[in-house]
Amino acid sequence: MKHFLPTMCCAMMMQLAAPAQAFTLPNGVKVNAVDDLVFEVVPRSSGTLDEFWCGASEYARRVLGAGWRDMIYVYRGRGISETTGKRSAVQFTISREKARDVPAERSIIQLGLKAGDSMSVQMARTHCNQRPIRP
């Protein structure tokens, strides 16, 4: 019994020190926590609009427990992944306060992945249902 407490404490410390594992979608898109409020979607290749928004929606619902009407905000547009070093990742948040801290990126062409862009979890989830167009 006297060895139980140190063993238990050691096991708990290892759990706390272990990095969070990536959330992976069936299509290979990974979603990693950047910090407590920001997460990034990292596709297998350069990524499509659908892959980024679908990944954000699935992570928000399944990992963060967001509701369908909750908003997802682009925190940082497409760039190098902070968690993997891959060349293409987009960072998101479901925190309205965190999203307010980000200046909106302005551009002539809007592709839906600029800092400040947002949509509901439910709308982002519709990007998971895209099928290739075949003649």
Image: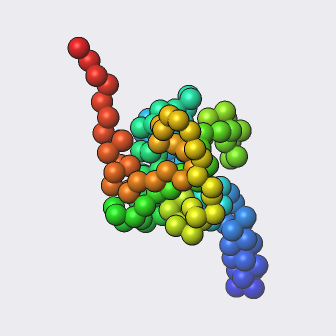
Write the residue at 53% across / 66% down.
95
Along the viewing direction, whichever of 81 and 4 lies nearer the viewer = 81
Residue 41 locus on image (x, y percent): 55, 45
Residue 114 locus on image (x, y percent): 55, 45
Kindly tell me whether residue 12 is visible in this rendering. Answer: yes
- State whether residue 13 is above or below residue 28: below
Tally of numbered discs: 0
Quadrant location of the N terminus in the rendered image? bottom right
- State whether residue 57 is above or below residue 65: above
| 60 left or right of 84 in image | left
Q: Residue furthest front?
A: 108
Write the residue at 50% across / 62% down.
94
- State whether residue 89 is above or below residue 71: above
Q: Residue furthest left?
A: 135
Residue 106 locus on image (x, y percent): 58, 44
Along the viewing direction, whichever of 126 and 58 lies nearer the viewer = 126
Q: Residue furthest bottom?
A: 2
